Image: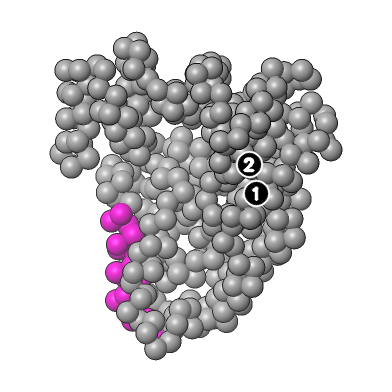
């Protein structure tokens, strides 16, 4: 049994011995969620609810788990319970807004407007409630008010963002110059078909593709993990003292590329020991397709594509938690980043012909059987 497995077993026993042990409940739910054992996490929370020990924060988490499992109405009820005792819970407000269908006069809109009046509301929480209000008013057809809510929410996030447009432009140009056809055609890397990379812009239909892949008995969804970039950064650091990355890409020893691929596969295997294929939905890995080719030449790369306007508008209306999506909270930066991403993908298509499978969201929705067969093949 792994250390995590032993910890989970210990926490389960602690809860059985003392059902009111809230600390054990919180830690057990956290570990089970990290392991994607959602059914088990739900059972632990329901145990806590019966023991009347579940906090508003855990009720919010319970609602998230239920929504993840497709139990929409139960999720809405759990979030309503959470907000009844913690009306300023911005995360619960936002999650609820993604599950509900709104009509004019919905009481949840008034709840959110009241929560915005709280003087103690942190800026990041204020922005999430503004996003939620945008979603609600957009559904009622009040598009001008909805867009104003989105603008306010994004202005808050933009003020906190560390995104650097010039650095992004420089990075793309340097990557294109470094990853030549000659470099990518060299035989390198670790031989494994374990990884399946989903790359592209956020809000491009990648979650739907991930769900489709996860229905296959041989495939496990890892979600948006940072393993590849973290392992890559650690391994490239000793080689970047004289010549920086990515200008030094051609000078990286073959053994380093193999080590990178092997270390990444080991990290996936540790997460899901039984899986034969594991999907990695860290979309910004689109900038690392060349790295993937050199480190893992047999890995699948699936490019998730959606109509540019739909993609960008959906990005602008979404409350991303991660700062590496900081470009989504300014319309000009969002448009510029989309063009950079498109330029980057065109480069990979030209220097790695036939390597990347493009999946168009609109085609998948219109012709699911045909597109799913193409995806699985």
The residue sitting at the top extreme is 50
Place of residue 256 in the rendered image (x, y in percent of width and height, measured from the top left)? 32, 75
The residue at the point 27 percent across, 44 percent down is: 273
Question: Which numbered tag is attached to residue 156?
Answer: 1
Relative placement, left or right, of 142 versus 79 is right
> SS of the residue at dot 1?
helix
Relative placement, left or right, of 21 versus 48 is left
Q: In the displayed structure, would residue 247 be above or below residue 3?
A: below
The residue sitting at the front extreme is 119
Relative placement, left or right, of 213 versus 278 is right
Judge whether residue 264 is colored magenta. Answer: yes
Place of residue 368 in the rendered image (x, y in percent of width and height, measured from the top left)? 63, 37
Q: Quadrant of the N terminus?
A: top left
Q: Which segment did they paint magenta? A: 250-267
Q: Are marks 1 and 2 in contact (CB under 8 Å)?
A: yes
Place of residue 42 in the rendered image (x, y in percent of width and height, measured from the top left)? 38, 23
Q: Which residue is mark 2?
A: 127
Query: What secondary structure prevails in the magenta region?
Result: helix
Task: Report which quarter residue 333 is drawn in.
Answer: bottom right
How far is disc 1 from disc 2 in space, using C-alphas? 6 Å
> SS of the residue at dot 2?
helix
Q: In the displayed structure, would residue 273 be above or below residue 64?
A: below
Q: In the displayed structure, would residue 177 be above or below residue 166?
A: below
Compare marks 1 and 2 and give the one earlier in the sequence: 2
Q: Is residue 209 visible?
A: no
The residue at the point 84 percent across, 38 percent down is: 144
Q: Residues within 10 Å of mark 2 (few under 14, many from 20)?
A: many
Judge whether residue 361 is colored magenta. Answer: no
The residue at the point 29 percent across, 50 percent down is: 269
The residue at the point 49 percent across, 53 percent down is: 282
| Chosen colour scheme | one colour
């Amino acid at each position: 049994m792994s250390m995590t497995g032993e910890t989970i077993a210990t926490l389960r026993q602690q809860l059985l011995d003392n059902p009111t042990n809230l600390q054990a409940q919180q830690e057990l739910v956290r570990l089970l969620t990290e392991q994607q054992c959602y059914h088990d996490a739900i059972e632990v929370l329901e145990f806590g609810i019966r023991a009347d020990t579940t906090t508003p924060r855990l009720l919010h988490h319970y609602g998230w788990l239920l929504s993840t499992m497709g139990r929409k109405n139960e999720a809405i009820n759990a979030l309503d319970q959470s907000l009844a005792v913690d009306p300023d819970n911005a995360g619960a407000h936002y999650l609820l807004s993604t599950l509900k269908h709104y009509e004019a006069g919905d009481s949840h809109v008034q709840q959110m407007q009241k929560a915005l009046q709280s003087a103690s509301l942190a800026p990041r929480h204020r922005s999430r409630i503004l996003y939620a209000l945008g979603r609600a008013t957009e559904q009622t057809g009040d598009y001008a008010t909805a867009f104003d809510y989105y603008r306010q929410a994004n202005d808050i996030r933009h003020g906190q963002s560390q995104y650097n447009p010039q650095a992004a432009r420089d990075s793309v140009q340097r990557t294109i110059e470094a990853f030549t056809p000659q470099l990518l055609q060299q035989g390198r890397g670790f031989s494994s078909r374990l990884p399946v990379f989903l790359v592209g812009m956020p809000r491009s239909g990648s979650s739907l593709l991930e769900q489709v892949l996860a229905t296959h008995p041989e495939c496990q969804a890892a979600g948006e993990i940072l393993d590849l970039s973290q392992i890559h950064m650690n391994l490239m650091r000793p080689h970047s003292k004289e010549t920086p990355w990515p200008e030094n890409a051609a000078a990286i020893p073959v053994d380093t590329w193999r080590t990178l691929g092997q270390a990444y596969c080991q990290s996936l295997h540790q997460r899901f020991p039984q899986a034969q294929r594991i999907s990695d939905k860290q979309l910004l890995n689109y900038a690392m397709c060349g790295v993937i080719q050199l480190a893992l030449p047999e890995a699948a790369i699936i490019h998730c594509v959606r109509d540019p306007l739909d993609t960008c508008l959906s990005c602008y209306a979404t409350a991303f938690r991660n700062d590496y999506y900081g470009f989504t909270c300014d319309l000009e930066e969002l448009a510029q980043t989309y063009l950079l991403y498109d330029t980057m993908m065109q480069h990979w298509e030209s220097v790695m012909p036939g390597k990347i499978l493009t999946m168009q969201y609109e085609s998948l929705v219109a012709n699911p059987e045909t597109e799913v067969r193409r995806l699985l093949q």
